[in-house]
Image (cartoon, coloured by chain):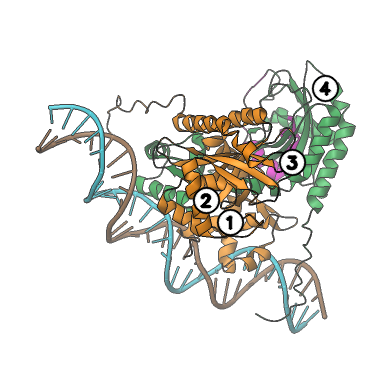
Chain colours: A green, B orange, C cyan, D brown
Amino acid sequence: MAQATGDGTVGKALDVLDRVASFGRAVRFSDLLEASPYPKATLYRHLQTLTHQGMLSFDPDRQVYSLGIRLVRLAHAAWQQSSLAPVARPHLEALSQKVGETVHLAQLDHGQVLYVDKRNATRPIEMYSEAGKVGPAYCTGVGKAMLAFLEEPALQEALSQQSFHRFTPHTLIDADALRADLQAINARGYAFDREEHEPGIICVAMPILTGKGRVLGALSVTSSTARTSLGGLEALVPLIRPVAARIADEAENWRFPYEGRKTKQTMTAGT
Amino acid sequence: MAQATGDGTVGKALDVLDRVASFGRAVRFSDLLEASPYPKATLYRHLQTLTHQGMLSFDPDRQVYSLGIRLVRLAHAAWQQSSLAPVARPHLEALSQKVGETVHLAQLDHGQVLYVDKRNATRPIEMYSEAGKVGPAYCTGVGKAMLAFLEEPALQEALSQQSFHRFTPHTLIDADALRADLQAINARGYAFDREEHEPGIICVAMPILTGKGRVLGALSVTSSTARTSLGGLEALVPLIRPVAARIADEAENWRFPYEGRKTKQTMTAGT
DNA sequence: AACTTAGTTTCACATAATGGAACCACTAGG
DNA sequence: CCTAGTGGTTCCATTATGTGAAACTAAGTT
């Protein structure tokens, strides 16, 4: 299988970058060395390059590498431009106001859920999610909502990336049970999280789909069993559905103000 | 000059990534092609690699590239781990509460100011800055506060990267005037922005320095001429200074809970 | 059907990455 | 003071990779 590194030099360099990131703290060269499959010299050069490029930063005092500032810059741009997030923001805001509960916006990333944005409830509740975090797809509302609308090959791929772990007594812990649920979700048009990831936490989630049915992301309203029930959440569907549709529409049709195909026709002059 | 691309293949790939980012929207292959110095095939392969790596994402419907989700993930990690931001956060919060004004945390990036975090005033005012944005260094409080404490070679480098532009009548538009101000700032220990970037916007800024005097970032309290004066802001210095010191200290001494140099001594075994 | 325009693939060639080994700079121990 | 060990940096011959002109394919256009 090895969907691993792959692509030549750049792939390796990015892999190194990821490794630094995964430490979650500043790392010394040798720490990294023993955690990497690369020989000293190679690793060294990659670190140099990345540092030189501003993707990493090196603290000469403590002799440690950490993630560079260029990443923060890029990330800002990424967030801004990931057509979903900025477009969805005001809608999340409005929806969360209207229902008074926590609202999530998520996207699928290598079979995992990435929480792209989050709006807290009027009275927030304690839970795992946080904008920027990644979580499991097979046991979260947003995750299942997205999986349920993937095409077969993509679904296959995504399922193979799940590592089923029983978080709560309600977690679906095998592909078959999951597939059954996904089928139901696909038919119904939205997903539930029945305390599958965190005890006491429930949600309804709706996929965000392009006109052609491609999955862009998902939207969810989350609450706790203490506060409401699945039925109570389901009652919100009529409020959520149009929001998802609206976001999908805007995200898809959002072209830049001045896009008009660059008056190329007019300049027929040769090169 | 050309501090440009540099580092071999990885450098080029990252350059391509930046170019995509700088469009601030999804781009078609050909848009990118005419904006890049790379020949078709090369650009094409870089895009492939980056996409394959998840740094870019390709929308097959519209045939456009945009920044990938892996960036968002990395960025999140970058922010979390850039020792300043998370450590500083509660202090910014507290400071902003106490003074009731907007507080910024910034770092220096290639001679530019990157706003890493921001706490809005009780009554916010309209201004340019925003967490994640980059701005000029020579005409902002935080920028000058950092520049003033750079070592000569680094300062030289940073100054050469400024492209002096007169934003307001008060903007310092040449290196000499700036150097003079920096000298004063260095002596005084903090910087002012006298409406140099945006009319009506003033601030006091304090550098965040390691014990050895290395510049980590800067902190500022911003307000408007309508609300206060430079004198009024200067009165806050006794409140700001200890916060900067505290942040510096925590950032510098923040090692991971379990860091203790990995019991390496104990395992003298070979290989 | 002939002619664009936009994107993808090929292939001989040049460049850039690789990694083993040698080389510092320090620190600790004898 | 010398010697061994560790952590980091540099060399350099070998080889893998990236390069880009040009050829090709798939959609439009006229």
| Gap in angstroms between the C-alphas marked 2 and 1 | 9 Å
Residue at the location (78% across, 48% down)? A251
Residue B100, compared with residue B44, is above or below; it is above
| Gap in angstroms between the C-alphas marked 3 and 4 | 22 Å
Instruction: Specify the quadrant that holds the C terminus of chain A.
Output: bottom right
Q: Estimate the x, y position of residue A145 in percent, counting from the top left.
A: 76, 35
Which chain does the residue under circle 4 lie in? Answer: A
The amino acid sitting under disc 2 is Asp
Residue that mark 4 sits on = A230
Residue B35, compared with residue B99, is above or below; it is below
Q: Estimate the x, y position of residue B53 in percent, counting from the top left.
A: 57, 49
Residue at the location (44% across, 43% down)? A58
Q: Nearer the viewer, mark 3 or mark 2?
A: 2
Residue at the location (52% across, 51% down)? B181
Residue that mark 3 sits on = A217
Residue that mark 1 sits on = B172
Are discs 1 and 4 less than 8 Å apart at CB? no
| Gap in angstroms between the C-alphas marked 1 and 4 | 61 Å
Tell me if residue A63 can be seen.
yes
- Same-subunit check for callouts 2 and 1: yes
Q: Earlier in the sequence, mark 3 or mark 4?
A: 3
Q: Secondary structure at mark 1?
A: loop
Which chain does the residue under circle 1 lie in? Answer: B
Q: Secondary structure at mark 4?
A: helix
Specify start and end residues of the magenta stretch as a single range: A141-168
Q: Residues within 10 Å of mark 2 (few under 14, many from 20)?
A: some
Residue B162, compared with residue B241, is above or below; it is below
The amino acid sitting under disc 4 is Leu
Q: Indicate yes or no whether the magenta region holds residue A130.
A: no
Tell me if residue A148 can be seen.
no
Q: Indicate yes or no whether the magenta region holds residue A145.
A: yes
